[in-house]
Amino acid sequence: MRPQLALRLIGGGLVLQGLLFYGFATPLTIQIFPGASDEAVHVGMIMRRGLAAMSFLAGLVIFLVRDDRYRTTKRVLFGCGIGFAAITLSSD
């Protein structure tokens, strides 16, 4: 797979994830923590919206760098691989 195509898919996926997390912050929080109080759901919603904004930002940067020089796109793709590996390993 070409690095430009990989960055296009990763960036587009992260932007879409950010939009969905922002749009469905409350239902997702209630689904994950069904017995939570209203205050706890509000805190979860705020945190999910922050996560959505960071996902949108990262996806947008990754998507916009796709047409840069080949070496730059390979470095960004390598950084994405390290970051996603860290996220995967930190999930329990």
Image (cartoon, rainbow, N blue to C red):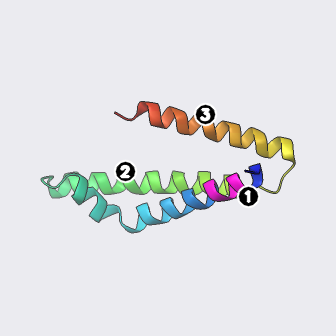
Identify the magenta region. Answer: 5-10
Residue 42 image offset from top left, x and y in percent: 26, 57
What is the secondary structure assignment of the residue under circle 3?
A: helix
What is the secondary structure assignment of the residue under circle 1?
A: helix
What is the secondary structure assignment of the residue under circle 2?
A: helix
**Of the pair 83 and 54, the residue shown nearer to us:** 83
Residue extending farthest right: 69
Badge 2: few (under 14), some or many (20 or more) residues near its Cα, within 10 Å? some
Q: Are marks 1 and 2 in contact (CB under 8 Å)?
A: no
C-alpha distance separating marks 2 and 3: 24 Å
**Disc ID at residue 51:** none
Q: Work out whether residue 65 can be spotted.
A: no
C-alpha distance separating marks 3 and 1: 19 Å
Residue extending farthest bottom: 23
Q: Which residue is mark 3?
A: 82
Q: Which residue is mark 1?
A: 64
Badge 3: few (under 14), some or many (20 or more) residues near its Cα, within 10 Å? few
Badge 1: few (under 14), some or many (20 or more) residues near its Cα, within 10 Å? some
Q: Amino acid at mark 1?
A: Leu
Q: Is residue 53 left or right of residue 74?
A: left
Q: Amino acid at mark 2?
A: Met
Q: Is residue 86 left or right of residue 5?
A: left
Q: Which residue is mark 2?
A: 47
- Give the mark nearest the N terminus, 3 or 1: 1
Q: Residue at x 30, y 60 (%)?
A: 28
Q: Amino acid at mark 3?
A: Ile
Q: Are marks 3 and 1 in contact (CB under 8 Å)?
A: no
The overriding secondary structure of the stretch rendered in magenta is helix
- Give the mark nearest the N terminus, 1 or 2: 2
- Give the mark nearest the N terminus, 2 or 3: 2
C-alpha distance separating marks 1 and 2: 26 Å
Residue 15 image offset from top left, x and y in percent: 56, 61
